[in-house]
Amino acid sequence: MNLLSIGGSDPSSGAGIQSDIKTFSSFNTHCLTVITAITSQNTSSFGMIEPVSQKILKNQLESVISDFKIDGIKIGMVYNSEIIKVLYQQLKKFKVPIVIDPVLKSTTGGSLIKSSAIKDFREFIIPLATIITPNKFEVEVLSKTKITTENTPEKVAKIIQKMGAKNIIITGIETKNNQISDFVLEKNNRYFISGDKISKINHGSGCNYSAAIIFALAKNKSIKESARFAKQFTYNSIKNAKNLGMGIAITDIQKYDKINLELSDAIIQFVKIKNIYKNIPECQINFVYSKQKPKSTKDILGISGRIVKAGRFVMVAGKLTYGGSKHVATALLTMNKRFPQIRSAINLKYQNTTITKIKKSKLIVSSYDRSQEPKNTKFKSSTIEWGIKSAIKNTKKVSDVIYHRGSFGKEPMIIVFGETPNNVLKKILKII
Ligand code: PXL
């Protein structure tokens, strides 16, 4: 995937183009860059700005557009009207998602746009936005409206929507109870997304948010999924921020965990399956994905809570954590010892209709009988380990599904195994 970042150079590499290169690379994505201005700044102070000429800006854009298939574009610092007009001319026909991060000021005090250019920013840049991601200050300047009890975030976001942006996310709009919330206005939907607040002044979090969200959009995630993803990504970057210079901390981008990415993608798809609530057992669901050659459940990523239902509504309670699952992770660990290619699993509610479908499908199924479980064996710490071992004892082929019918006081259960979470998902779709 190729993502294009258009913005200013920051020699401290905390924000701007340099920051986006780090973020996109962490997603194993190629970062194309078009520089609008060179800034001089460090973690304590902001120095000069020298915008590039229209000629070299246009030339940079043409050179990347003519050569690469571009999957998404992020626009950060634009600085003046000349730059704004070239961007508009070159990008207005573009059919890929565009995220606008309307940066006006740097945390260390520099002005990142000329005040004379704000009018053109409203007219030419805002209409390019699939999503625009202002903070409270930025949305107030762009809409010329202060957020108050009367002028709600929704009213103010609607002013920006009228200017032509499809979706608006006002970041860090509300803080209470140690939570910080973003307000999202879509075409026909509005909601807050909340998360834990970290009180750490930093350089880079705004850029991290907008870069993460264009990646998610380019991967075809919905606005809500993208906003959640970007919030979590930014939370981590702030949490890991480092004091590298003498001033404020610079956000840190950890190498992205592919296991985490694949499992979270699959979980998002799983909860969207129609009527999936019918397959959630009393003990709820865990969906797990293991590193290669796991030694213990600590090498297996799972949900620290569960996938739970409230009526027909299904949601993910908790975060993805290594060691987050005990039961399903132990089942996977046992399976993986015998069949090392099997690295993902999920538990589903036992239903006769599901078993009938499994038997009709070409999937390989085995089972065990919990009432046969020996008392005081070496497995006493883990019934599930005993169960999986006895189910696969005499099979040569990998089981796609293992089930048991329960016993007194024990809920029956189905576990689906696969090489990857996506592979598990495909099997689920065949049997529910
Ligand atoms: O974080 C906003 C931002 C974007 N782009 C450049 C910056 C900054 C903040 O300092 O310097 C080039």
Image: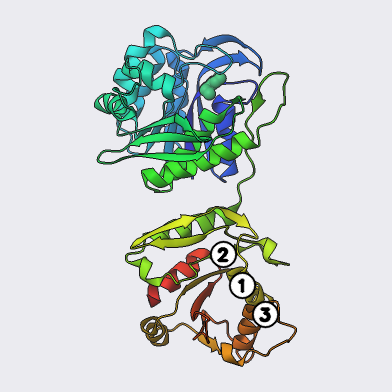
Q: Residue at x 44, y 32 (%)?
A: 74
**Do callouts 2 and 1 mark residues in contact (Cβ within 8 Å)?**
yes
Q: Residue at x 49, y 81 (%)?
A: 412
Q: Which residue is drawn at 55% across and 52% down?
A: 319
User: In screen coordinates, is 298 left or right of 345?
Assistant: right
Q: Residue 338 got which mark? A: 3
Pointer 3: residues within 10 angstroms few (<14), some, or many (20+)? some
Q: Does the numbered disc 3 mark a residue whose Cβ is under 8 Å from ligand 1?
A: no
Q: Which of 426 and 368 is in front in this view?
A: 368
Q: How is the image coloured?
A: rainbow
Task: Return the residue found at the far right.
Answer: 378
Amino acid type, residue under disc 2 in the picture:
Val
Q: Distance between the residues labelled 2 and 1?
A: 8 Å
> x%, y% of residue 367?
53, 87
Residue position for label 2: 288
Q: Which of 224 and 384 is in front in this view?
A: 384
- Vertical placement of residue 167 versus 102, above or below: below
Amino acid type, residue under disc 3 in the picture:
Arg
Q: How far apart are marks 1 and 3 (CA)?
A: 10 Å
